[in-house]
Image (cartoon, rainbow, N blue to C red):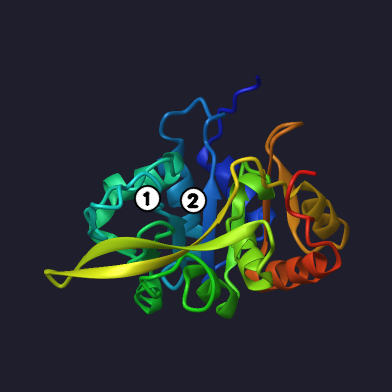
Amino acid sequence: MKFLNYSKNDFDFHLKKLGLKKDMNLVIHASLMLFLNKNSPNILFNSIKKILGDNGTIFFPLFSFRSHGNSTFKKLKTRPNSMGLLSNYIWENHLDEINRSNCFIHSYGGIGKNKNLLDQIKIDRSYGKGSFFDLAYQKNMFFIAFGLNLTNGCTQIHNSENIKNVDYKKKILLRRKYEINGKIKKVKYIYHKKSKKIKSDFSELEEMLLKKKLINKVHLTSKVYSLSGHTRSLQENTLREIQKNPLLLIKS
């Protein structure tokens, strides 16, 4: 495996080539496992902030898949899990600057001018109207899957599955508790679950979108690359492709 020793200039160049610009609302999922420099999360974070400027905003995953149903979700205390080095770095080093959506499973953090958009997110759902992914679509946020393909780096696509009500996902209700303004609120959380036998695979969709130049692809190594694009175009084209082939996003 080839490891990378990126400098700040390397990160700046890669992000700009992906299309990151000043004042954007950015959604980023990142994998930094290939980077030798242990400070790579810090370098990447500061590169993003430098390019976005004072009027830009970074949104990043703070998912809580492992939280038990009996636990109480506290948005700035419940620790996210399995979210990667970048999200962990921001959580551990910039918590006083973060806003977080009140969402038990698919919560997102925000840092920057428009971080309080996360206060609009409904607390009882992962997908659909009122979710973070609906907000990302409405605001046409720019997304980057840094060092990731669409399957591993773009949860937004699952929102399209929800909109299309695909047969391989079933709606379930989870009983969850939140602490909001010092009070405990009980919520029936709407989630959509697929069988463990069914695996997501967005590779065919990825090739379609690249061929149509609807997403950007920039290589980090000969085999590892980052993807980027605008959320609205991604979702609308995904919906069209699911309409043609309802099983497009899973392994056959």
Badge number at residue 97 = none
Quickly name the residue at label 2.
Answer: 47
Badge 2 or badge 1: first in the primary sequence: 2
Q: Is residue 155 above or below residue 242?
A: above
Q: CA distance from mark 2 to mark 1?
A: 27 Å
Q: Quadrant of residue 228?
A: bottom right
Q: Quadrant of residue 114?
A: bottom left
Residue most extreme to the top: 1
Q: Residues within 10 Å of mark 1 (few under 14, many from 20)?
A: some
Look at the image and tell me in which quarter the C terminus lies: top right
Q: Amino acid at mark 1?
A: Ser
Q: Position of residue 13 (x, y in %)?
A: 63, 48
Residue at the location (45% across, 56% down)? Answer: 60
Badge number at residue 64 = 1
Name the secondary structure under disc 2: helix
Q: Position of residue 207 (x, y in %)?
A: 83, 51
Residue sitting nearer the eye, 175 or 219: 175
**Count of numbered circles in the view:** 2
Q: Position of residue 154 (x, y in %)?
A: 61, 54
Q: Amino acid at mark 2?
A: Ser
Residue sitting nearer the eye, 237 or 148: 237
Residue at the location (65% across, 21% down)? Answer: 2
Q: Position of residue 97 (x, y in %)?
A: 28, 61
Q: Is residue 33 above or below residue 173?
A: above
Look at the image and tell me in which quarter the N terminus lies: top right
